[in-house]
Amino acid sequence: MSPPAAIVSPMPTAPVGEVIEATTTEVVAQACNLESPPPLGTFVIVADDRGCEVMGVVAHVETGGLDSASRPIMRGRDGVRDRQIYEENPDLLFVLRTTFRALVVGHNAGEGWKQILPPLPPRLHYSVRIATSDEARAFTEVGFAYLGSLLSATDIPSDEVVAANVRLAGEQRGEPYAFALQAGRELAQCLRADYARLSALLRRMALAAPTGAAR
Amino acid sequence: MLDHLNGFSTNGNDPPDAPRPHPRLGVLVSGSLAEGLTARLDAEASVESIRLGKFVKVAGEKYAYFCLVSDVQLDSANADVVRDPPSGPGAADAFVREVLAGTTTFGSIKLKPELMLEIAISGEAASDVPQAARTIPPHFSSVYEATEEDFHRVFGAEGEEHFQIGQPIDMDVPVCINLTKLVQRSNGVFGKSGTGKSFLTRLLLSGTIKTGAAVNLIFDMHSEYGWNATTEGTGEVKGLSQLFPGKVVVFTLDPESASKRSVRPDGSVTIGLDEITVEDVTLLQDELKLNRTAEESALLCEEEFGKEWVRRLLEMDGDELHTFADRTGGHIGSLGALRNKLRKVRVLPFVKDTVSHSSLDQLIASLESGKHVVLEFGHQRNLLAYILVANIITRRLHSRWVSKTETFLSTKQEADKPRQLMITIEEAHKFLNSEAARQTTFGTIARELRKYFVTLLVVDQRPSGIDPEVLSQIGTRITCQLNDERDIDAIFTGVSGASHLRGVLATLDSREQALVLGHAVPMPIMIRTRSYDERFYAAMSPFGTPAALVSHATRYTEIFGGEDD
Ligand SMILES: Nc1ncnc2c1ncn2[C@@H]1O[C@H](COP(=O)(O)OP(=O)(O)OP(=O)(O)O)[C@@H](O)[C@H]1O
Ligand SMILES: [Mg+2]
């Protein structure tokens, strides 16, 4: 699977979402486009007016009704299925929405990336964009401490998120195998007390990442 | 971390941009002075590239420590890994293994600190001479591959005193021994047959001849030191008299064989019957198959006839023997047996009834004048001839050197100081086994050390056959591969804390590798023996090495211009 074009773009990209809930640890955003939210594991950035940027990793993506009162119902009938449903019900695009959650893993207040939480949450209704490859590189260059905070997140499939993030970041850096190896070593330190989880996670990363041949 | 490294590796005159490859191997995690140190290998350092006996450096805070690797092992930080090893053939397991290597699973090396060297703290001149390790480096000190500079610092650079005897197993830098220290004690070259003892001995001799550290007498049983010696590979190698023309003279016991090999010896040696003493005969116990009573009978004869005893005994017929036995109370059977056995000595071609002492005197005079002497045995390569001749000559030499030393001690004139003399003997256990060592001059020399300026270079394949007391006096031991446990024990006689070296010795290749330990090296080291080849010949030549010739040539072109300008 080749990465979406936006992921390897060096220029700041167009917004992919808008912040609709924000805490210092987590951002929930509504995707600009119902059908193309940022994929699981992607680095996303929310900037404020003072030049402070908050880095997050997409940990959960969800599509549903606009609010709890308008729950989607089944629309397919008489052999109309899948894509045809959307074609016959153009209003769907306005009653459904896609939201995604990004775990906050660091911030940059003008002095470079730090893998610690920002002092304040991002502002509501500000845009969320996918980090450029330069930004992803700069952020991962700082270290792997952020993987530790991803691992300890509870209500998400954190190992899946880690594996996806390592794969995407490795691709953005142009060295998927070497990056996976380095990240793996960091994870081995974090999970030294839980070998079962570590080996499952590493095997998952090996499945997601290109093999040694890409070295 | 790298900062304090630079603290001692910069000695002020290094160009600042000199590349200094300094691969880190790992980090110290535990240790004790008694048991040695344990370091954890970095993920990048391959456990397979670390051999037992490898020379490494640990950068402490005040000192750099030079250590030998005494063990390599696989460790894991987590017992679960070992219970469920990622050992599958697939890419996923391969990835897991690669991730775990260096973190969860890692190599450990055990290190034996041998020397320590103070690190210069800016401004203070740190000592340049490493001392025996008496402390250990702190936790998490980095362990490095030793550099060429480290080898220089520890083993010295080739020059007046230092002579390159080989290279480390895994690097191409010289390892030198201190020849001045070497010749002050008796030394040994040990190893199984065919491991390169004679080649090593030739190297050591070349070193002492080149630098003049000692004058050498070589009992050359197999005629391989003076002129061409054969090698198993390429045919022939040069002998010492070819490498050092004018400095080495060759004497022979067998002029006929010498002329067949078109070797023109500088003299031939003959032995008079009157030069043979009871000591010489007892030493031949095995070779002549003498029984226990032979010594007594010989002593009887000597008492009666003095120096003439062998000849007189040989001349007696049955009746005379009876009369003699009756008169002296000797045992007729034993006397008769001794006489028959001594006939074997009499028929040796270089043994004469009487000789003018000229040939032996000439040999001794050569040594006194600073010429090195190779005594070839030619076809007389049986042990009987070898032991007899070596013992007689060495006894004469020793008494000569003892009286020289006594003169020197009374006059205290530098001119009276005897030359340092080194005597090389192969099959040394024949002279130095527990029984012989007590009686022979060789035993005396080995025990009395450098007092009289005479030392031995013993070459032997069965060190366990040598008297332990003699072994413990051996200053420098150069040991090639040995398999027999008793021989290995013998090598380490009188060496304290050598248990880690046994393992190192066991990893030597069957040829051209050796473990050097003792007086002439600051710490034990495993080497690949220096090649005895054209390059070595050139290095030994008085005109210097080819490199020196080249640099002369460049100087010439610098001054006078080259052809193309
Ligand atoms: N330093 C060296 N340079 C070149 N060749 C060597 C060297 N050391 C050993 N060899 C090779 O190994 C062979 C055996 O070496 P050498 O004759 O010294 O063994 P040795 O231990 O003296 O054997 P023995 O006990 O039978 O006398 C030589 O013939 C030579 O080919
Ligand atoms: Mg030999």
Image: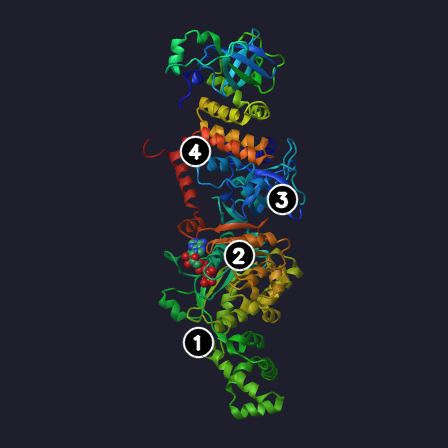
Q: Nearer the viewer, mark 1 or mark 2?
A: 2
Residue ID for mark 2: B479
Residue B530 relative to residue B39: left or right: left
User: What is the x, y in percent for residue A93?
Assistant: 44, 9
Q: Amino acid at mark 2?
A: Thr
Residue ID for mark 3: B37
- N-terminal of the pair, mark 1 or mark 3, is 3
Q: Callout 1 environment at 10 Å: few (<14), some (14 to 19), or many (20+)? A: few
Residue ID for mark 4: A212
Residue at 61% x, 64% y is: B468
Residue ID for mark 1: B349
Find out whether the residues at labels 2 and 3 contact each other: C-beta distance under 8 Å.
no
The kind of secondary structure element at disc 4 is: helix
Q: Marks 3 and 4, Cα distance to the nearest angstrom?
A: 35 Å
Q: Is residue B253 above or below residue B77?
A: below
Q: Marks 2 and 3, Cα distance to the nearest angstrom?
A: 25 Å
The kind of secondary structure element at disc 2 is: strand
Instruction: Give the camera-side residue of B291 and B35.
Output: B35
Instruction: Give the camera-side residue of B224 and B434.
Output: B434
